Amino acid sequence: MTLSLLQPLDVYCGTAVCFHELSFLERTNVCVTVCIEGISAIQCLDMELMVKRTFIKPKW
């Protein structure tokens, strides 16, 4: 499985250092290949992230 990594950005399009500064998730050109057999657990997103107005910028 190939995953595209996201960069956390703040309101001013600088890198967000902590969750409370996060306003955007921007796709990057960085991809990683992960062997599904190597995944032993999945962590759910924090519910605070689900209710916060966070936007994902389109890759194209």
Image (tube, helix red, strand yellow):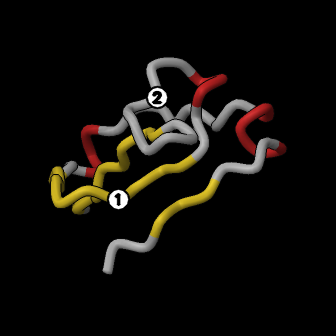
Q: Is residue 48 above or below residue 31?
A: above
Q: Secondary structure at mark 1?
A: strand
- Identify which residue is drawn at 31% across, 81% down: 60
Residue marked by disc 1: 27
Q: Which mark is residue 16?
A: 2
The 10 Å Cα crowd at callout 2, few under 14, some 14 to 19, many 20 or more, is: some
Q: Is residue 49 above or below residue 31?
A: above
Task: Say which amino acid is labelled 2.
Answer: Ala
- Identify which residue is drawn at 56% across, 32% down: 43
- First in sequence, mark 2 or 1: give its number: 2
Task: Say which amino acid is labelled 1.
Answer: Arg
Given residues 23 and 36, the one toward you in this image is: 23
Q: Which mark is residue 3?
A: none
- Identify which residue is drawn at 61% across, 58% down: 55
Q: Is residue 46 left or right of residue 37?
A: right
The extreme bottom residue here reads 60
Q: CA distance from mark 2 to mark 1?
A: 14 Å
Q: Secondary structure at mark 2?
A: loop
CB-based contact (under 8 Å), mark 2 and mark 1: no
